[in-house]
Image: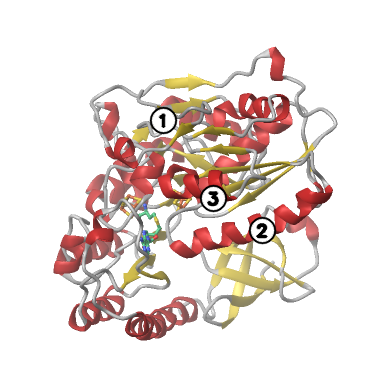
Amino acid sequence: MAKCVNKENMVLPSLKEARLRRNFKTETIKYSVIDKYAHLGDGKTYYIYTYGCQGNEADSEIMAGILESIGYKKAMDPLDADLVLLNTCAVRENAEQRIWGVLGQLKGRKRNHPDMIIGICGCMPQEENATQKLIESYPFVDLIFGTHNRGNLPKLIYQAYFTKEKAVEVLSTEGNILEGAPKVRDNKYKAWVHIMYGCDEFCTYCIVPYTRGRERSRAKEDILAEVNELVKEGYKEITLLGQNVNAYGKDLGNDYTFGDLLRDIDKTGIERVRFTSPHPRDMDENAISAMAECKSVMPHIHFPVQSGNDRVLKIMNRKYTREEYLYKIKRLKEEIPGISITTDIIVGYPGETKEEFNDTLSLVEEAGFEGAFTFIYSKREGTPAAKMEDPISDSEKHEWFDELKKAVDKGYLRGTERFVGEVVEVLVDGESKSDLGMMSGYSKHNKLTHFKSNDKSLIGKIVKVKVKEAKSWFMIGDLVE
Ligand code: SAH
Ligand code: SF4
Ligand code: F3S
């Protein structure tokens, strides 16, 4: 594995290395910790700030598990913790801006608490320029590590405590698979389950293939063992994670695909299965029929389209056309009647014209999306799009963005209104944040649903709710039975 080591023994990231895809076999590494580190955290507390996607949330649960296994306890107040980790996202500029802001707050805190260890991990350190800035301008950061070496967390903490040197280890490898690490899950009823890591798509705007390495699938036995364990522990819902979940298995060199995995997971008896994100190009008939046949797979799909224009899709390297995308949607709707479809859209890709943007607007109507995460294109150093001419002004992009939001919001309302008068099944999360005396959870179609009750024993159960009112972002109903 190529390492870029400088004179202070720091292992620094290299985007050039991160871009490589060699032909080697992924290694599965079993997590273990040596005796020297086993009590490193005794009597100390930790706090993890998590930004970015569900992949990062799942990674934070592993880091929490590792920390608790070596004696750390979770701090009530992050500013009082002995160890603070920022698990970062690099997907857009504003995700990074937030991190620099939090670091500013922590700097002040460290003045009164000089023994506090501050660590940055996740996707941001995988970027050369971010790590350089962290080293040069943030001397109070003790620990910098990337997405490929969270299993080394005890060693890095040891180095920060006992050598008082800044511990910097950001591998720009294609990546291995870590199995058997302890986890502290945030929720007792809903769990994340990684089925694959990394991404080989190289959409031209996106930093993720550089920060997360090569596409690599977990062995189906490891996934099924994890799901079986979750069922035993009383979990009701799992969300299968990966940057391109329906590329599952392609790297394993057998014929077992995402659709087959869904069928096997269905047999474990887990009540609800969701997944994020599938890539439209890899959405095959086997996956669609598995979604239709498996009772546990929920009738909702987050299906990122990015653009409705063929030229833009092509230069984004999405590898499908508008027509092909719409065909997949048609097949999903035919096989899973009533399915709710949401998406991701980027506005203002370099060189996109108003006419091309209008194609995205019309696609929102035509596809009948019931929600979308919409983003203004953000330049990511090291990606091919960063070198492209970008003549459209920011203000114009914002106008397009507002127009798109209006179209998307109509879809949200259409998506909840269709349930008024119907009985939906809701997995209860807890008391509604906005209204005391109400409880809330998500329906099978992934609609946030509130209902009158203060019976906390319902938390973690699936209840029936008759919907009486629809708003854009939620539904309100009454408990049935
Ligand atoms: N793997 C997932 C998405 C991962 S990133 C997929 O391909 O579907 C989540 C979303 O962030 C993407 O779908 C895209 O819409 C958005 N995104 C990624 N890079 C971006 C960039 N440079 N600027 C703006 N949005 C971006
Ligand atoms: Fe990024 Fe494309 Fe991979 Fe999604 S599929 S993570 S958008 S490169
Ligand atoms: Fe962000 Fe990394 Fe996820 S860049 S979106 S945290 S894979």
Image height check: is 198 above or below 167? Answer: below
Image-quarter location of ligand 1: bottom left
Residue 15, how many percent across, how many down?
Answer: 34, 42
Residue contact between numbered discs 2 and 1, judged by CB atoms under 8 Å: no
For label 2, being within 8 Å of ligand 3 is answered no
User: With 179 as the anchor, is 80 left or right in this view?
Assistant: right
**Quadrant location of the N terminus in the rendered image:** top left
**Quadrant location of the C terminus in the rendered image:** bottom right
Q: Which residue corresponds to mark 2?
A: 104
Q: Which element carries disc 2, helix, strand or loop?
A: helix
Amino acid type indicated by mark 2: Gly
Crowding at dot 3, Cα within 10 Å, few <14 / some 14-19 / many 20+, comes out as many
Which of discs 2 and 1 lies nearer the camera? The answer is 2
* Outermost top residue: 35
Q: Which residue corresponds to mark 3?
A: 88
For label 3, being within 8 Å of ligand 3 is answered yes
Amino acid type indicated by mark 3: Thr
Give 440 or 156, whichever is nearer the viewer.
156
User: What label does residue 218 carry, if any?
Assistant: 1
Q: Which element carries disc 3, helix, strand or loop?
A: strand
Residue 471, how many percent across, how many down?
Answer: 55, 82
Look at 60% across and 62% down and name the residue there: 426
Look at 66% across and 33% down and name the residue there: 65
